[in-house]
Image (tube, grey):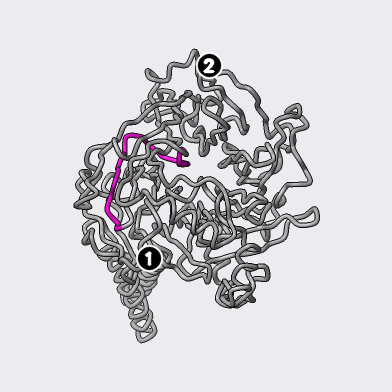
Amino acid sequence: MVAARSALRAVFVACVLLSAGVVAGGYATHSPTATASEPTAPGPNATESPKGNPGAPGAVASSATGAASAGSSAGQSSSEARPSGITVVTTDSNQLLLGLANDSRAEAEIVAYGRNGSVQYYNASHDRYWDVDPVIGEDTESANGMNETNEAERANEANGASGTTDADSMTVEYAASDRLNASACELDEVNEGDAGEGNDDDGNAVCARNVIERVNLTTGAVTRVYSEIAPRADFAPWNDVDRINDTHYIVADRNENRVFVVDTRTGEYAWEWYAASAFRFDSGGYYMEDWTHLNDVEYTEEGRIMASLRNHDQVVFLDPTRPPAGALVTKRTLGADNNRTVLYEQYNPDYIPSENGGPAILAADAENNRVVEYAYRNGSWHRSWEWTDESLQWPRDADRLPNGHTLVVDSNGDRVLEVDRSGEVVWNLSVGLPYDAERLGTGPESASGPSAGRIAARTDSEGDPANGGDDPANPPETDPLADALKGVLSGPALSTVLYLSPRWMGITELLALCVLVVSALCWFLAESYWRSVFADLRDRAERVDRR
């Protein structure tokens, strides 16, 4: 028994030391104290985010030196892997839930990165930043060599894409949100039903202010376009807005599970649609406080509104010319509730118009850990392209660029990357908890990018097949074992844990931490048991001796 106990102790010691070493190694490698300028991904094409040194909000950097006035030192991309234009990234924050003020995932930001990796603009004045879009035709001043209309147009023509680009624009607009305490809520009353989730530590009801703002990245000037206050703090953000014209915007309202069109001059709603008019309340899974998680809206070429109902695993189309109760265009719906093979809690789907090979939808299929495209053919949707790699963990945005590349936001992977037509990563940006990304000079989202079918037709004619030599319209077979393993290491629960974790903790560190906790607990219980057994034996021996 003594030998068995010693062997078991050795196993416990090995498990604790090895798992603790993995956790400590992960922290040492990826913690905020690590060298900021060192790329966090292999290869010369990685750039480091300024997170962790926020500095003054609204800072405009010098494009000549590449030094951000936010006080950061960004790594440089190699000239061979430079992106086609400035990349604007918005980031989320887990600080409100965990209070990790020094972690690189704590500060929500909007950052503009130049082609050489330098930080051109930085702002962290809001609690959370969401969707960002270029404003076409605003501000013709260039920054860091961005005045390249000809390059964008050539990329369009070479890949069979068309559409308006924003190569001269240095102005973007974004949605952001802030938590407010009771005194700042400016509400006539706070519903008792909302107070439970919206209370702060002192029991005071809080709310959220949602804003649409526009910023000139050259001058740093910020203009408030519109704002509203919602009675709940945690589930009230407008994850996305889309501009119809200078005065009217479409809003994805998570708090009310609705899509509405607002006149920003008057605050009046020109049209609104509630998900409850088309979906049962027992649909959408197990999210009681966040029923639909409506996270994206887009105005399409047909005058319809495309909306993403994340918790229902569906992208729907709405016709604003119809009465709201009958606005859902059912034949165009992509996905189905709990049919996770099509979409599984998707984010930020983009509509690719017919002029660029559509209709097609490019989506960040978050819980399936992939980026996927569906083409609408003969009255139904068909998968036409998908991409993933071994590191992709909870993607939340994907844009098709005019050159056929795809810009991907890997939220729990803490990176923004560009994937070429063959599926290889050609540019990588290290940034904590990114949410959305836009490449200036390529048009809004995927509007100017070609569909997978258009890319396949083009590359076939050139003898340069995309997607590693396979037809993007017929994705290659994958390894069932690898797919099964990735399926186990995915899902909303794991995504939530990684979302709440500090940046240095990936899946490997998380598994090691679990092994560490379980091993330590089992060791403690075993030692307690052994002590109780030996104590009992000693008691029996003493009773025998007394006799």
Q: Residue furthest top?
A: 188
Quadrant of residue 180 within the rendered picture: top left
Q: Dot 2: what SS?
A: loop
Residue at 70% across, 43% down: 283
Residue at 59% across, 39% down: 297
Residue bearing the label numbered 1: 509
Q: Residues within 10 Å of mark 2 (few under 14, many from 20)?
A: few
The one nearer the camera, 392 or 292, is: 392
Give the spatial CA distance, label 2 vs label 1: 51 Å
Magenta region, main secondary structure: strand
**Image spot of residue 327 (x, y percent):** 74, 33
Residue at 21% across, 54% down: 73
Does residue 535 show up?
Answer: no
Q: Dot 1: what SS?
A: helix
The one nearer the camera, 155 or 280, is: 155
Q: Is residue 294 above or below residue 334?
A: above
The one nearer the camera, 272 or 484, is: 272
Does residue 217 show up?
Answer: yes
Give left or right: position of 387 versus 2.
Answer: right
Which is more foreground, mark 2 or mark 1? Answer: 2
- In the rendered image, the quadrant that contains the C terminus is bottom left
Q: Residue furthest bottom?
A: 3
Q: Which residues are magenta?
A: 116-135
**Image spot of residue 98 (x, y percent):** 36, 44
Quadrant of residue 485 within the rendered picture: bottom right
**Image spot of residue 525 (x, y percent):** 39, 66
Q: Amino acid at mark 1?
A: Glu
Q: Residues within 10 Å of mark 1 (few under 14, many from 20)?
A: many
**Image spot of residue 170 (x, y percent):** 37, 41
Q: Check residue 266 in the rendering and tell me which mark sits there, or answer none.
A: 2
Residue 363 is inside the magenta segment: no
Quadrant of residue 507 within the rendered picture: bottom left
